[in-house]
Each structure stands twice: as structure tokens, then as C-alpha cells.
Image (cartoon, helix red, strand yellow):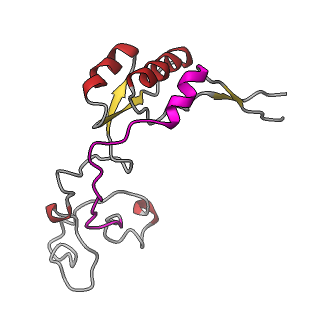
Amino acid sequence: RVASPIYLVCASESASSVDKMVKPLVKHNIVKKRKKKFIRHQSDQFMRIARSSWRRPKGIDSRVRRRFKGQIKMANIGYGTNKKYRHVLPNGFLKFRVSNVKELEVLLMHNRKYAAEIAHNVSLKKRKEIVLRAAQLNIKVTNAKAKLTTQENE
């Protein structure tokens, strides 16, 4: 079995304009108060909760709940992200999910703040139309190259 990628390009015009895409109006340096994930108490001791997400300890004698020195940190509101930077992508845009070309027209006046993201269930034909129209409207598409590669089985 040999996999050979086939790259489909919508049009020569859109391929060149994708490189010169719009930049965000304001690109903040996003400040994170904490980069490490909050781990669940005793998740290192028990396999059944090893990969589970954060749960607040509720035991009456819990060292973590009572915030003893040297214990794991508990998640609380103080670790929240600044409202200005919340949901901002590393490239400085906010995401806007798009399923068709008509929804893309909404971003016409907001192309410096929002970037379009094509929904996962959009077909290849519609994806090409959306990417082509986005290039005309000067709108950034975060996943413009998604599903444009196919694999052939021999």
C-alpha cells in the first residue's frame, strides 16, 4: 500500500492571495497565568482516575481542599484568562464557524477581528467554494487546507 497525496488547488488567483492574507487589527501578547493543567487529586496513585479531568476535592479531611502547603493547586477563578484575550487564537483572530458561503458574508466587515473556520461536516465541493469566496473577501480561513488531500490505495 502506497499513499500519495494529491493536492487540489481551487484557482491560481486564490492560491496567491492566501499567502497575502489579512492581519488582525490588534495582536495582543496573550498572558497566561498558568500553563500547566490542573490535575485531579490522587490521580497519580489510581489508574482509574489517571487520565480524568479536574474534579474538586470534597472530602472533609482533604489536604488539597484545605489548601495545605505542598499540595496540588486547586483550580479557581483567579486563574481565569483576561476577558480581552479569551478565545483569541495565537494568530490574533477569534474563531467563527462557517458551514456555507452565505455565512461567510457575515465576516465582510469584521475580517480584521474574526477568522473563518470551516465546519467539520462540510463537503470538499463546498469547502472549495468557501475558500475561494474567502480569498475574494480577504477573510482568513484557519483550516483552508483541511480535507484537500486524499490517499490512494494500491
- Residue at (30%, 36%) from the top-left corner? 112
Q: Is residue 139 toward the left or the right of residue 113 in the image? A: right
Q: Which residues are magenta?
A: 11-36
Left or right of 70, for residue 147: right
Up the image or down, 5 lies above or below 86; here it is above
Above or below 12: residue 1? below
In the image, 133 versus 147, the foreground residue is 133
Say if the magenta span includes residue 56: no
Viewport quadrant of the C terminus: top right
- Residue 138 horizontal/vertical position (percent): 39, 27
Residue 111, image x, y percentages: 31, 31
Q: Nearest the camera: 10 or 86? A: 10
The front one of 61 and 36 is 36
Residue 101 in which image quadrant: top left
Q: Residue at x 27, y 80 (%)?
A: 71
Q: Could you say which quadrant of the image residue 107 lies in?
A: top left
Instruction: Pick the quarter of the image with the N terminus.
Output: top right
